Amino acid sequence: MKKTLLYNAVIVNPGTNSFVLPKGALLMEGDRIADYGDSEELVERYRRVPAVDCRGRVLMPGLVNAHMHLYSTFACGLGCEPAHNFPEILKKLWWKLDRALSLEDVYYSALIPLYRGIVSGTTTIIDHHASPHAIEGSLDVLADACSQAGIRACLCYETSDRDGEAIRDAGLSENVRFVRRCIESGGEMLRGLLGLHASMTLSDETLARTAAYVRELGIGVHVHAAEDVSDQEDSLSKYGKRVIERFADAGLLGPGTILGHCIHVSEGERAILRESGTFVAHNPESNMNNAVGCADVVGMMAEGIHVGLGTDGMTSDMRMEARVAMLLQRHHRGDPTVGFGEAVAMLVEENARLASSLFGVPLGVIERGAKADLIVVEHHPFTPISVGNWYGHFLFGVQPSRVTHMWVDGEPVMVEQRVLTLSAERMSAEAMGLSGKTWERFGGMPD
């Protein structure tokens, strides 16, 4: 079995059993972490093992993106009619773009943010996909892109009633087919969830049919919830209940379910989230961009709700998303004492717990037997670093520094800032050849 020793590193292990080894080393054996400890001691113990000198840089677990839209890539530079509120943003931009995508578009629009995720330290993506005129096989295409990139991925298709029953049925079928494929394969690099768009585009029939598969397959759903106040208004007017209540009544909530956003939720809904163990994915950059409000993640976490961090397709950089999360909470509350611990905990603790649960293996931790999903970051600590102040080093040292190395499942993905699995130039050229036609289907090129 292949072994690699990473030595001369500042090893940081986040989470409940956190530790910092200022002069540490770590042994990878196959796809697992086999040993770690003092660098001098392990270099002597494993002197015949191929070794990588981390040169005093930070070695830590790879990062997880808990809510991503890989399909959104071709929106870069795309012009559309002005949108003055969130429903208009959906109708004038996102729902037009996803209808314009082909399966080939899906593949190349995924490769680019996957590449960006690699260079910023993301080893696991939890994606939420939509391409209503290219549904069948779309999750396989995404899986192929993630496999090419060397990234661990949990995928789903965004089932919705907004394009009619036939497309709704195709979306649900794609989810179920892909989930069964993942269950049957038994691998640890690929997982599936049952994707749904949002309450405002989902009928009671669709929720009931999805809930039946939740029970049959033993998995959760991935759905947007109360991202904008319009979602709550729609649910109250049509069904006489709030969004979280509606999902709970349908049997969709639980530890395996991811709710994106949860900005406009009541105290009663928060109690449901806490009691059900449902995971909330906070997406601060997207929320600010869409002007939909600020989720009270500080309050939710204090109440025991599991809140993690995603990017909603706005970026692939989870380190920056954590820093923005901190700044947004402080700005929104007018309180410079909040958000610091919560922002990093969402990323390095809650996201890691979610990913470990979804994939059934230890992720996001440095411990013997855990998956070897690791990154080296060019942060050479210039002030004392310890368990007590590691979060500060993350936000103000690790965040602005370059990621130099990445291993996923023990396999090298990036070495000294050179991505081994993807070519930025080649995939960008391929995407350029496709995206113009996608824009024409969208409704015309920008001026």
Image (cartoon, rainbow, N blue to C red):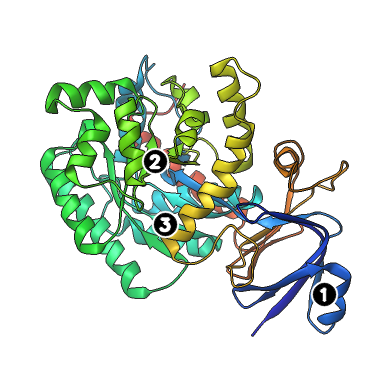
Mark 2: which secondary structure? Answer: helix
User: Is residue 407 visible in the rendered structure shown here?
Assistant: yes
Tag 3: residue type?
A: Cys
Q: Is residue 225 visible?
A: no
Q: Whole-Å distance between the Cαs marked 2 and 1?
A: 55 Å
Please provide percent x and percent y for residue 205. 10, 43
Q: Quadrant of residue 373?
A: bottom right
| Residue nearest the observer in this picture, 136 or 442 | 136
Disc 3 on helix, strand or loop?
strand
Kindly identify which numbered label has been placed on residue 42.
1
The residue under the point 30% across, 62% down is 178
Instruction: From the image, state whether disc 3 or disc 1 is nearer to you.
Output: 1
Dot label at residue 341: none
Q: Which residue is mark 2?
A: 437
Sooner in the amino-acid sequence: mark 2 or mark 1? 1
Q: CA distance from mark 2 to mark 3?
A: 29 Å
Left/right placement of residue 165 relative to residue 380 reads left
What crowding class fits label 1: few (fewer than 14 Cα within 10 Å), some (14-19), or many (20 or more)? some
Q: Decide if residue 284 is on the left or right side of residue 394.
A: left
Pointers 2 and 1 in contact (CB under 8 A)? no
Q: Please name the residue that numbered disc 3 is placed on.
A: 154
Q: Amino acid at mark 2?
A: Lys
Q: Quadrant of residue 246?
A: top left
Helix, strand or loop at mark 1: helix
Q: Residue at x 22, y 30 (%)?
A: 200
Local crowd size for mark 2, using a 10 Å CA cut-off: few (<14), some (14–19), many (≥20) = some
